[in-house]
């Protein structure tokens, strides 16, 4: 069957090959890889795959294929890396339209020449492609001020399981018609369609910036420091914490941006405020600390927690803990052995007391198979209906999302 199937796929898109040992998704091998160069070619490939009943999974640079649950099976990987063009950049309107396979880092380099940027930072967001960043909802410390990737997305083009091309949103910031479709696909892990194009609102690059860093005297002090800066008039763009191990000192880092003329005075005021609340002197630097925006090694969990729970989280969470204390979004390092399940349960109890959730983001496939990766999902019935609507045969990244969707 493989040769006729490959021939049929190659008629749909010439750049289709048999998969190699490197073409796996969280330990699950694929059979073929398609590399379309446009939305129309993706449509043709998915239409052919639908006729053949193939299970399809989109891939950019593959930096986050270990997120979520392993797929139930993969026949065809749709590799978007040939789709790496800036389609339109309206600098005056602070809007850019790009293909999904464009690396985020390359997009930032292009925008920087116009003194603009897509307000995403951190290795998880900037190491991958535009489509992968949307599909995994990866965002870094700047989310405190500018929001996550779903907040910056104002338009999207996707190809559905049957090859239908769907577009939503606009190319100017004030036109938000259909924006809900962009929200729907953000974080969907390829289970609802293949993202092929995106429209983002941009922000001017700041003239200057500073990091203010203090090592807090304990979890209570760290939480108090974050609360003090949040309540101040100093207008930070990010407030992050790093705690390498339970009981280890907590480092608090605050970022401010602005014009060069006033940045030193503001940084000094933040340093005084942060140092007083943290119980140790704060330092001001032009460089981010080495851990800033960096992911923790697998196994790791993504969690949310309301500000009221920060002190308990810093004191009692197992493993390493890092993330945006201002936005209440963190990554936790987990036990790489038989204690993973117990640590996951403990972390979920802490988060639940403060309105949060915990997802086992990345771990060895055999560990995921024995655990509840996603935890309680109140909207699961709605998500199942959406899956049935967009992918009635459940062929797109099957099993990778919540509830085996």
Image (cartoon, grey):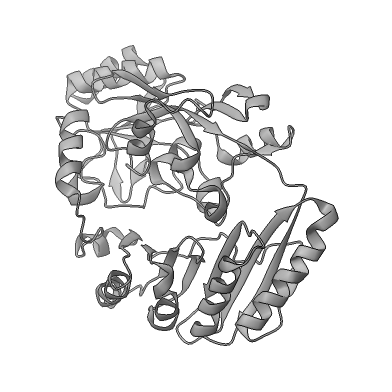
Residue 100 position (above or below residue 380): above
Residue 154 position (above or below residue 381): above
Residue under the point 25% across and 47% down: 401
Question: In the image, residue 42 lies at what x, y percent?
Answer: 37, 21
For residue 258, side relative to residue 245 (left or right):
right
Residue under the point 20% across and 42% down: 383
Residue 78 position (above or below residue 45): below
For residue 339, side relative to residue 98 (left or right):
left
Question: In the image, residue 186 lies at what x, y percent?
Answer: 38, 40
Quick one: quadrant of the C terminus? top left
Disc tally is 0
Question: In the image, residue 351 lies at what x, y percent?
Answer: 32, 70
For residue 252, side relative to residue 363 (left or right):
right
Quadrant of residue 304 within the rendered picture: bottom left
Quick one: quadrant of the N terminus? top left
The answer to whether residue 141 shows anywhere in this view is: yes
Residue under the point 71% across and 82% down: 281
The answer to whether residue 391 shows anywhere in this view is: no
Camera-nearest residue between 247 and 329: 329
Q: Residue furthest top?
A: 11
Question: In the image, residue 198 lies at what x, y percent?
Answer: 47, 29
Camera-nearest residue between 320 and 76: 320
Q: Residue furthest right?
A: 261
Residue 82 position (above or below residue 58): above
Camera-nearest residue between 86 and 46: 86
């Amino acid at each position: 069957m493989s040769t006729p199937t490959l021939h049929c796929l190659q008629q749909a898109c010439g750049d289709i090959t048999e998969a190699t040992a490197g073409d796996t998704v969280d330990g699950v091998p694929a059979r073929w890889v398609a590399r379309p160069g446009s939305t129309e070619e993706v449509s043709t490939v998915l239409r052919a795959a639908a006729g053949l009943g193939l299970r399809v999974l989109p891939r950019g640079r593959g930096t986050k294929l270990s997120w979520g649950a392993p797929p139930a099976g993969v026949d065809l990987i749709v590799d978007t890396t040939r789709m790496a063009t800036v389609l339109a950049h309206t600098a005056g309107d602070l809007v850019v339209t790009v293909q999904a396979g464009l690396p985020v880092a390359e997009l930032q380099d292009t925008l920087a020449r116009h003194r603009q940027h897509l307000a995403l930072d951190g290795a998880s967001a900037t190491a991958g492609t535009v489509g992968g960043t949307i599909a995994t909802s990866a965002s870094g410390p700047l989310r405190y001020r500018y929001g996550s990737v779903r907040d910056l997305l104002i338009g999207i083009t996707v190809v559905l399981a049957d090859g239908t091309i769907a577009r939503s949103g606009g190319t100017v910031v004030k036109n938000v018609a259909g924006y809900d479709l962009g929200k729907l696909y953000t974080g969907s892990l390829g289970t609802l369609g293949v993202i092929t194009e995106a429209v983002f609102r941009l922000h001017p690059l700041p003239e200057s910036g500073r990091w203010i860093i203090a090592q807090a005297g304990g979890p209570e002090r760290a939480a108090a420091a974050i609360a003090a800066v949040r309540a101040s008039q100093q207008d930070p763009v990010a407030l992050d914490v790093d705690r390498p191990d339970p009981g280890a000192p907590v480092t608090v880092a605050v970022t401010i941006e602005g014009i060069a003329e006033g940045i030193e005075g503001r940084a000094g005021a933040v340093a005084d405020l942060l140092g007083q609340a943290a119980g140790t002197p704060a330092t001001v630097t032009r460089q981010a600390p080495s851990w800033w925006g960096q992911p923790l090694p697998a196994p790791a969990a993504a969690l949310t927690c309301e500000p009221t729970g920060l002190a308990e989280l810093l004191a009692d969470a197992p493993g390493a803990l890092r993330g945006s204390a201002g936005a209440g979004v963190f990554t936790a390092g987990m036990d790489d052995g038989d204690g993973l399940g117990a640590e996951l349960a403990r972390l979920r109890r802490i988060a639940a007391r403060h309105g949060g959730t915990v997802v086992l983001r990345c771990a060895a496939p055999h560990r995921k198979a024995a655990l509840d990766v996603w935890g309680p999902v109140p909207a699961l019935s709605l998500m199942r209906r959406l899956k049935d609507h967009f992918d009635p045969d459940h062929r797109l990244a099957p099993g990778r999302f919540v509830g085996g969707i």
